[in-house]
Image: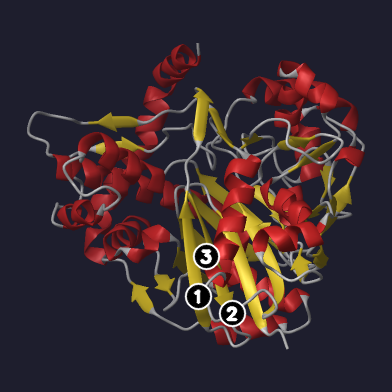
Amino acid sequence: MASLLLGIDIGTFSSKAALVTLAGEVLRTAVVPHGIATPAPGHVEQDADGVWWHDLVALCRQLLDGSPYSGKDVAAVAVSAIGPCLLPLDEAGRPLRPGILYGVDVRAAQQIDELDALIGRDRIRDFSLMSLTSQAIGPKIRWLRQREPEVWRQTRRLTTASAYLVWRLTGEHRIDRHTASHFMPLYDPRTAGWSDRYAEHVAPTSMLPAPGWSDEVAGAITQAAAEATGLAPGTPVAVGAVDALSEAISVGVVQPGDLMVMYGSTTFFILVQDAPTPDERVWTVAGAYPAQFNLAAGMSTTGSLTRWFQDQFARDLPEGDASMLFEAAARVAPGAGGLVFLPYFSGERTPINDPQARGVIAGLSLAHTREQLFRAILEGVACGVRHNVETLAQLGAQARRVVAVGGGAQTDTWLQIVSDVSGLRQEVPTLTLGACYGDAFLAGFAAGLLRREQITEWVKPGRIIEPATALRPTYDALYRDYLDLYQDSRRVVHRLAARQGS
């Protein structure tokens, strides 16, 4: 009898899958790296078949081919992916162009202004429980209509990364409500469904996938998907989730007051709530389960900055290995020799929501070293984490528990800097496999093989990162400089961003 659970996650720079038992034991994992395309400044894309579907098939084959397990051993599947993204499909469900990525893609700034003017910024915020930002899909749909009319003429469906993969696996167009929340102003959080109230300015909601909760069954593996992946036809597939939500589930961030800080290519925050506390600086979205809400937030470039730094300034180090940089940064005194760094290389999402923001390094002198520059990057990201967490607290949404996950959580250097700058006590579970582990749990729950509370049996306590209180005065001063630097450089940086765009 099939008793294994398959979780698959398609991330920004890599995809990962895990084959897991009902008790949460990881039997096999697989990873496939990939990249992103930046065809123009502010445009960030990925090919839906060449990256998303290719990786899913490759991961399934890595796990099953030549292993003790076959597709017949898999009882259920769940998929998560980067999101929210925008992918137009033709009549046959084929992609018409590369997928337009989440908030790191800032191409629709003009369309945000247009929708704010047409509908009213306050009306949008009152209806959607958040304001339009680069994370919103409605403006990107409007961009597609205006800038690529030939593509729009052929478009019959609009979907996102995880929903496209569910479609390829099952033939069903479904989307999780957390991701659907970002298709504003087309989603009504009060009814948890689509609304045509403002559709005339964006697109008919009939073009969108049917919303569902992450732990519902979307459909079953089709014969065509079975032949491609090695999975058995008829295997149930969950509606799934955006990667950050699955990552939160993977470490037991499921109770009101739990906050996940995901250190990946971007840094993402999910605070679980039982009632919404909307504010224009952050995102109020549906949770994974009925009657749950999330306060979500996200920084655009964090882990990707360490990759950028190594590619540009540390080519003498082994490719893909940043451990030496982190070790060197740990030996640099707090404050990085008087440097302040703004990590806004692709604009910034929350809480400033400024697509025209750009990176700034202030305080440089001939005496500064590569190690100090790298530490300044880590401290700048830490200031961004503090900015987001303090914004959540200002809304009365105080985190009672903070759990750190993601690739950046594998190094204590970065976590310690974040704790020291922000004052956060961070928990790091023993196993931080990532979103694919949360997907495996969602698959089991959707198929009726697990109870929701069993996630606490899957997640094992690990290490605790405590803030160094003695460093608080140093980092309070740095944080004030961080906030001032953005305000003081904003006008110049916006002019520079405009030149880059032209």
Q: Say whether residue 298 is visible.
A: yes
Specify few, some or many for label 2: CA neighbours under 10 Å numbering under 14, 14-19, or 20 or more: some
Q: Which amino acid does label 1 sit on?
A: Arg
SS at mark 3 in the image: helix
Circle 2 residue: 69
Callout in the foreground (2, 1) = 2
Q: Say whether residue 243 is visible.
A: no
Q: Do the residues labelled 3 and 2 touch (CB within 8 Å)?
A: no
Q: What distance separates the C-alpha of mark 3 from that of mark 1?
A: 9 Å
Q: What residue type is labelled 3?
A: Gln
Q: Are marks 2 and 1 in contact (CB under 8 Å)?
A: yes
Residue 97 or residue 50, whichever sits in front? 50
Residue 216 position in % (x across, y down) = 80, 68
Residue 448 occupies which quadrant of the picture? bottom right
Circle 3 residue: 62
SS at mark 1 in the image: strand
Which of disc 2 and disc 3 is earlier in sequence?
Answer: 3
Image height check: is 203 above or below 321? above
